[in-house]
């Protein structure tokens, strides 16, 4: 009877707890990794003999180091079982607002379901007549399971982070300089 009555609240609480835990974990991993990152090494710009930009590329070695650092940080944190327990007051599961936050703590254990995934992609966008923006993003995906005495809930957390943005400035077309379009 109790399981039936609190099942919907249990699921909502497990999902929100997992999402909050996962977002914090991903944010910490990004902060640790980016703190040690040199942005000037992520993008290489090549110039022609006359000083004009003729190419731009991502430095795959540094980008792969960022990916592996994020995955390693998350794996280490999830490997430490004391970091993966979140306590929620029992009154919260009742669904009654004035009991939320009251009562003894119920531990929710959070486990990693799959390995964390970091996908890197880049975009190039127009930013005006003679400018382009080159951006590199990381998409971090983490699958977690919240384990309660009554049920297990699986949650996928995904976070997109801008790693770097480079403005590429080219020549202004002569049609714009002469006033002709």
Image (spheres, rainbow, N blue to C red):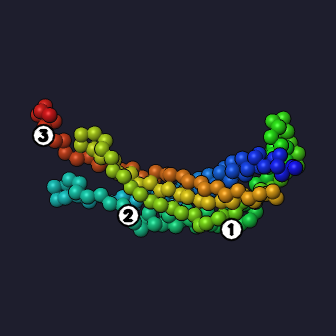
Q: Identify which residue, 96 or 23, lies in the foreground.
A: 96
Query: Where residue 35 sits in the image (x, y, percent)?
Result: 53, 56
Q: Describe the element under mark 1 as helix, strand or loop.
A: helix
Q: Identify which residue, 34 or 128, lies in the foreground.
A: 128
Front label number (2 vs 1): 1
Q: Describe the element under mark 2 as helix, strand or loop.
A: loop
Q: Residues within 10 Å of mark 1 (few under 14, many from 20)?
A: few
Contact flag, marks 3 and 1 (Cβ < 8 Å): no
Q: Residue at x 43, y 65 (%)?
A: 62
Q: Residue at x 50, y 52 (%)?
A: 160
Q: Residue at x 41, y 68 (%)?
A: 61
Badge number at residue 139: none
Spatial CA distance of label 3 from label 1 is 60 Å
Badge number at residue 79: 1
Q: Describe the element under mark 3 as helix, strand or loop.
A: helix
N-term mark: 3 or 1: 1
Badge number at residue 59: 2
Q: Describe residue 39's horizontal placement relative to residue 31 as left or right.
A: left
Spatial CA distance of label 3 from label 2 is 33 Å
Q: Which residue is mark 3?
A: 174
């Amino acid at each position: 009877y109790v399981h039936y009555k609190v099942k919907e609240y249990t699921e909502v609480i497990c999902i929100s707890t997992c999402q909050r835990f996962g977002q914090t974990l991903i944010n910490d991993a990004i902060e640790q990794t980016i703190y040690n990152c040199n942005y000037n090494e992520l993008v290489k710009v090549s110039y022609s003999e006359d000083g004009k930009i003729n190419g731009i590329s991502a430095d795959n070695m540094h980008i792969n180091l960022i990916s592996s650092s994020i995955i390693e940080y998350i794996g280490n944190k999830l490997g430490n079982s004391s970091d993966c327990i979140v306590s929620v007051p029992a009154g919260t599961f009742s669904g009654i607002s004035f009991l939320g936050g009251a009562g003894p703590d119920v531990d929710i254990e959070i486990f990693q379901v799959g390995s964390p995934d970091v996908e890197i992609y880049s975009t190039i966008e127009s930013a005006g007549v003679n400018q382009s923006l080159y951006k590199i993003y990381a998409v971090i995906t983490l699958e977690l399971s919240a384990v309660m005495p009554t049920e297990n809930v699986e949650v996928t957390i995904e976070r997109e982070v801008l790693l770097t943005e480079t403005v590429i400035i080219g020549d202004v077309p002569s049609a714009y300089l002469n006033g002709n379009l």
